[in-house]
Amino acid sequence: MRTITSSGGKVETVTVRRTESSDAHAINSLISPATVAVFGRVNVIHLLEKANLAVTLSNAKNEVLAHAAFSDHPIGDIVDQACWEPFLHDNYSPLNTLFLHLFVAQPIFSIGSAKEIDSQYAHSHCVFSERALEKIFEPMKSLKDPGPQCSAFVCHRHSYCPRLHVRRARVEDHDDLTHIFAEQTKALTGSYGTYFLAELIEAQDDENHAAVCENEGTAVGFISVSGDINLKLLNECFELGPFNGLYKPSPEDLTETAPEPGGEGTPGDTNTISPQGSTGEVQYEMNLTQKDPLDFLPNIFKLFPDRDFCIISVPKLAPEFPLLQSFLRVVPHHTSSLPQELYIFHRSGILAVSADRSAVCDMVKRLSLHESLLEDLDMFYQAHRDMDGTPLQAFVAQVQNQLVGIVIIRNEEDIDYIRANYNIENFIYFSHHRYEEHGQLCHFALNPIFQHYAKHFLKEVLRLAHKSCLYYPIYPSYHNQKNSCAHYLTSVLNCMVPVRPRRQIVYPLDELGINAPSKQITKDQVSYALNHINRKLTMEPKVTINARIVVVGASDTGLAFLEVLAFCPHLRFNNMTLISTHGFPGYYTNEKMRFLSTSHSSSDRDHAQMSLRSWINVVTGKMVGIDRAAKHVLVSGGRKVPYDHLILCTGQQYQVSCPTGVDGSHLPPKSQLPAQPRRRYTGPVPSNLFTLNDHHDCVTAYQWLLNNFVELKGNAIVYGNTIDVYTCVETLLCLDVQGYRIHLVHLPTTEGSSCSPGSCFSNPTVEKAMKKALEKSGVHVHHNCLLAQMNDGQNPEPITSLSFTSDSQPLRLECSVFMNLSSKGVDYDAFKTINDACLVYDGRLVIDTTFHTNDSTIRAAGPLTKFARRYLADQWSHSSFNSREVGQELAAALLPFFDPTLEPAVNSPADLDRLIPIYTQAKIQGGRLPGGYSYLHATKPEQRPSAVHPGREILTGRIETGNYFHLHLNQYGMVETITCLSLKPFPVSNYLCLYGKHELLLNRLCSRYDEGLVHDLYSYFREKWCLAIYHDRFADFEQEMHQIMESTKVQLVQRMVDEKLDIIEEPNVFLKKVFETSGGLASLKTSTLNYLRYNRYHLTMYAQPGLL
């Protein structure tokens, strides 16, 4: 909080913040005729979209007192925005100059507001054209006579932010410096002793120096630097190859872009220095943010004239302080266990960077994909267009006439597709950007020592190219991304924000005809992840989070958690790690590999559009240990992965079935069999036994079946009770395995199950359809069987026969391949790790309602977990809910620790921590079932399946015709269960939107069904009226409708009370008449039309006013 004083002496506490679009109305109200005379007529929303920096001063009541908007080019058409540097001459450059495009303020606070904004946000120079703000801005002298038809005024930063004098530290500075270290004194004293500061100053020699910066004779900043560096340790722990390992470089290293990470420098003389500690007073924080390298570092490099690099190591949990914003973070080696981050700065980084058009070849010759870059550069020289005729532009960065970077962009010709498929409108108002102002970043290369200027480089590209937005697509690994070269990719991504993909409506294009959306929107193309930067974002800092967040398990829960963190646009998580047995989930190149059912949590397309690989480190291996004291996870193979926050999301997996060992030839009656406790299989796993849990297992089984089973003889035995056994059987049939070669063996039904023996379906019609399909295919089905022996108790490698006990005769089957899907449980290695780490385990890992285990740094979620017994809710667990929703809530619980825009997390009082959270999203199952059926089942989370559900059923179609569709509505008319069984593919994403909707919203479904007007729900939900319900923004529209209705209801009640109305007719009739005459109905209509109009590119099938 800051204070300003009005012209009348009134003191107001103010907050200086970035301007939001919601401030536009208040800003407009402050525009006066004098403002128009200076700045011209201003469209505030348009200005906010195009300004590089927009700042608002607001008071404690959040009232706007003042606003200023800055751009990187002069106002109006005085000079082209790409060519203004010669216009001003002297020391004005895009790196240190902004132009004021609008300033408005409440009259009594205008001077105080202007000074406050300038001191907080101005660069070295702030320039505007015309006579205004005379008390702050100085007139600039014209260098020509006659000069331009305008006046220019400048405000220098040093006028309001003191220039700090840097000198050698003296012992006498100790008292001035003590209060600067106040917040760190306890930690520093514990590490270095009570008099650490005085000793540090006194210990100066040729290799150790200390400096202070002072203002008006008082020390306000301190830095201590050492030239004694352990380069061997740093090279072992960090990717220092691009910096020649911090050893003395060859002369050409400054002019060539460094090699790809992983290279090693040649040991030689040390070429670096390291600050031992640096800080600055709070009141100079903003100044140090912009000026630290220019205030401290030139002086430090003078003390070490033979050193080129300055490095800083900081604890991973320490917040980023101002000095680091001018440094480059060095990527740690994947084997590094150091609890610190390394930042680096090159002495040439003090120089200003300017952008210009020039040739470039040698700079990129050592980069991968450089051929593609040079090809596009040649196309630019020849025709300024690529092979498709799309305009190309190329820009280089120069330092002292040496090339240090290049960017090649092209016009973004697919902007309609981007708008329709990605949430780009979270960052821009699309209507305020012309089509030609959108560009695609094709290639980016920048010398590592200037990587901290990457965002400025992109800002200059936007200005010089007359663009307002740039997009950078990242294609999945299986796509040949030959047209893109980014060096380094992390620098580009750190400057940009990831854009979330949008859920798409699956259109019945043939039925819509000319009313279908444009082919530019509906066309099928290779999916990619989209990253974006615009002019507003070029000066929007991100909060750097170096805390090590380790997620164990690539489950739906774990991936949903990582997705939320990766897509926080204002946060930059540098150390997110995923530990998974088989790495990141793969993609299916062949649908015949899908042996398992799906939760429809995310598809291959979703993974491609998110590209989580770009934001996380993936460690392939199995968790085999947790050292809570040292805070690291031990992974199979011996690798240690350190953590600050550990997230366990390993879920439950199918376990290798352990035979009971009962000899079938001497089998007693079932009632006499001893109870068999659940045992773990510890022997060698036969080569033809497949326990399927993930994509890797499915691909392995698919390849083995093609090579060793499909075209040969022998039986396939599928063992289990879940839906996965049915999808596995269907996959085998699709591989042309004859039905008579397949044996489906069901386990005995567990107690408490509502399903009939051998069935995993809650719907008897689906169960009946499966029974018929299996019979028709010739698949043998065996019920209530328990695995007794492999190969009659002999060596199981390979399996040639399996013996089962049953409630009748023992069963012995010849076997060529055994597909085991029998029982899910917590993986033994995960259980042993959890147990050995002394985490509370009670059948599953015990957590509280905030996902905490008994270790505050370890959280867990998903089917691995259960709630503590104190909640008296053993019937509920995360396995009852949608795993993706659970993962998102887990991320929401962790984000307040990192996100300054959120309220800090506060633990609930013990007496209030009694209720478990209940999640609302549907629990979903789906897949391909025997008979060629496509199956979908989405239902409300519940404690355990129940045969009785209040409400009513809506059912059309039959299994014989392959168009079975069943909806269950609860007693309030809300869709609670969706079951689809069809011989034809159907739009799953569309139908999932029906969950939770009221039947009245579905075009009065119940009344139409009762009247016999709905014969086929598949056709009914393909009709044009319902397509808006499938739109990804329909939920926002519903919420807006609800708010209007609630507001109108309050007004109606208040009117009835105030006017004391006598109601002589039916209340419902009376309320309807009153509502129709109120403003609520008009608001509903207006909002509906706005929704259709704003989303016109998706909802072209709806008529709108003015279109008929």
Image (tube, rainbow, N blue to C red):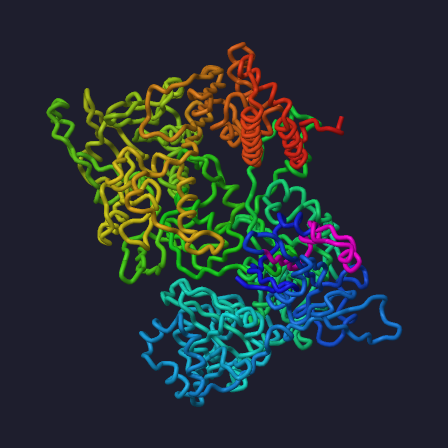
Horizontally, residue 143 falls left or right of residue 302, namely right
Q: Which residues are magenta?
A: 29-58
Residue 263 among magenta residues: no
Image spot of residue 584 (x, y percent): 43, 49
Image spot of residue 1107 (x, y percent): 75, 29
Q: Is residue 499 above or below residue 1069?
A: below
- 739 or 683, which is in the foreground? 683
Quarter of the picture containing the C terminus is top right
Horizontally, residue 11 falls left or right of residue 223, namely right
Image spot of residue 922 (x, y percent): 43, 32
Q: Quarter of the image holding residue 386?
A: bottom right
Residue farthest to the right?
146
Q: Is residue 62 above or below residue 128?
A: above
- 355 or 358, which is in the foreground? 355
Horizontally, residue 255 falls left or right of residue 900, namely right
Counting the numbered discs, the total is 0
- 1086 or 893, which is in the foreground? 1086
User: Residue at image x 74%, y 69%?
Assistant: 134
Residue farthest to the top?
1011
Image spot of residue 1094 (x, y percent): 66, 37
Q: Quarter of the image holding residue 820?
A: top left
Residue 38 among magenta residues: yes
The answer, for residue 403, to whether it is visible in the render is no
User: Residue at image x 63%, y 44%?
Assistant: 418
